[in-house]
Image: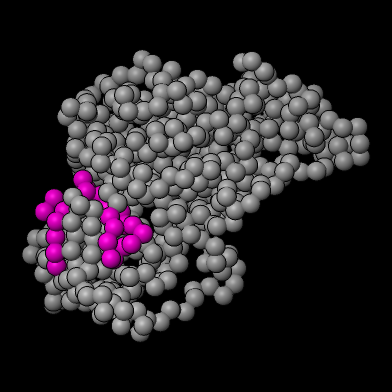
Amino acid sequence: MTHRKTPDRLRSARWFAPDDLRSFGHRSRMMQLGYAEEDFRDKPIIGILNTWSELNTCHSHFKERVQDVKRGVSQAGGFPVEMPSLSVDESFTKPTSMLYRNMLAMETEETIRSHPLDGVVLMGGCDKTTPGLVMGALSAGVPMIYLPAGPMLRGNYAGKILGSGSDAWKYWDERRAGNITDAEWLGVQGGIARSAGTCMTMGTASTMTAIADAMGLTLPGASSIPAVDANHQRMSAACGRRAVEMVWEDLTPDRIVTEAACRNAAIVAMATGCSTNAVVHLIAMARRAGINLTLDDLDLLGRVTPLIANVRPSGKDYLMEDFFYAGGLRALMKQLEDRLDLTAMTVTGKTLGENLMGAEVYNDDVIRPLSNPVYHEGSLAVLRGNLCPNGAVMKPAACDPRYHVHQGPALVFDSYPEMKKAIDDENLDVTPDHVLVLRNAGPLGGPGFPEWGMLPIPKALIKQGHRDMLRISDARMSGTSYGACILHVSPESYIGGPLALLRTGDIVRLDLPNRRLDMLVDEAELVRRRDAWKAPEPHFQRGYGWMFSRHVTQADQGCDFDFLETSFGRAAGEPDI
Ligand code: FES
Ligand code: MG
């Protein structure tokens, strides 16, 4: 390195170095913790933002892992401090974890800014924790390294391999069709999540940690290591060591999260069969770094990037554990070398290209060569039309191709409970050509943009053997979901987007190759309907939800709060102590 930071230039020196009353207070309080001055003076203080909680089942190993990180920080001559952070868990948070991603981002930014931290290790993994932590840390701007929780082991029941989410939906449909017993259903319940770690399909968690990895924010390939593998402990200690070095090197995130890094991350996401949620988070993360990544950029990359990770739900056969054994994300990125910007800087202090040296694929059925992809295009397509002027997204590889071009009558529901009641009605008047529509499920309507987008197939059709149909909503869907689901319709219906004007019986047309989604209703009629439309009552009258409703942006903008976006105003300076 050309210039190494000297101890007097450490951020934490503002708290601890001056010979004044304030600093006396800071030093004496550190001594209250049992530390001698030489333990923390002139050393990089590394905040370890730990999103552990007893209800975050995906992060249950973080309580021990944080000890490995601390060990690494101390070994490298830093001083570790664990900072418990909002543990946005996917499994239990109601109405939806997405309501709280921005809260974690705000907490992260302010925790870093207000404390004597020279650098941070961000411990996350369960869906929203990756973008939440990264968004906040990007705005805070101190050197940071991301420690991904890692996927859980493969699910297993009665000799069958089970995938998070995906198999829950599959077995649920079979149960509704009366094809499996209660005992089998209980067996699946006990076998589908059997170790610490994040969902082990290529759901939102694995997609987002892969994105952080491809952006250069993790140690190379860290995102693929299973949570309970001893490699994960060693990686955690290495994160601690590296965070200290990054402080001396002044390797701040603005040098890593560049336009090239965001593009690299988008290409890798497309090649992995990524969760549709990645679109929203990637846009939000890029914007925190001052980069205007758009839906159109992502659609363009989606058209030219083949899907090469054969991991469910977009891939057919394998899970994250197999992906790791096949070489993991470094091996996948190696296949994409000609398409990535290899000069991009990473947390290692080396370029992406240097980090990929020696990476190899050990099973080319799991990580396919570009000449034999799982699907010829990337995992996401962005649609536009009179139903979604600002865009909607779809996962072409995860649905039956016969729905790629489809026309049928809409069956519209205004709320989730209304839809749920109807789909369980065995006498519902519905055909496989119908287009199921759910509205009022967007960022404001849900509220919080819930994962309702994989609308259940009506029981009447399940019994006839159907397992897919065209579905449209302004909701998100779980990254472990699949099917012909069009999501993130923007603007959302709750604020008067055109989806609000659609009526049962109207003909809807999807033309995926041309990226169009339209309702075949004439303009004059739409104007009449718009005049008659009334805005629904607000969901929140106070509290965080009220603030969320006032400031959240639409899906195509990343759903950040407008006042947290980089372009909103000048960032706060360093605390004036
Ligand atoms: Fe945490 Fe899926 S529930 S990653
Ligand atoms: Mg999920």
User: Residue 278 in the image: x percent, y percent?
Assistant: 38, 46
Image-quadrant location for residue 500: bottom left
Q: Residue at x 21, y 74 (%)?
A: 521
Residue furthest left in the image: 464
Q: Is residue 150 left or right of residue 370?
A: right
Image quarter hosting the C terminus: top right
Q: Nearer the viewer, residue 78 or 180?
A: 78
Identify the residue at horizontal 44%, vertical 47% (top origin): 283
What residue span does the magenta drawing correspond to? 383-408
Q: Quadrant of the N terminus?
A: top right
Q: Nearer the viewer, residue 567 or 207?
A: 567
Looking at the image, is 479 positioned above or below residue 414? above
- Residue 175 appears left or right of 527: left
At horizontal 30% and vertical 83% (from top left) the residue drawn is 528
Is any atom of residue 51 visible in this view?
Answer: no
Residue 342 is a magenta residue: no
Q: Quadrant of residue 242?
A: top right
Left or right, 575 with respect to 81, comes to right
Residue at x 41% of width, y 23% of height: 342
Relative to residue 520, is residue 305 depicted above or below? above
Q: Nearer the viewer, residue 95 or 560?
A: 560
Between 563 and 186, the one nearer to me in the picture: 563
Residue 177: image x %, image y %? Answer: 14, 63
As for residue 394 lying within the magenta part, the answer is: yes
Q: Is residue 136 visible?
A: yes
Taking the view exactly as shown, the residue that stands out farthest to the front is: 524
Q: Position of residue 387 (x, y in %)?
A: 29, 66
Say how the picture is coloured.
Answer: one colour
- Residue 531 point in image, percent of width and height: 36, 83
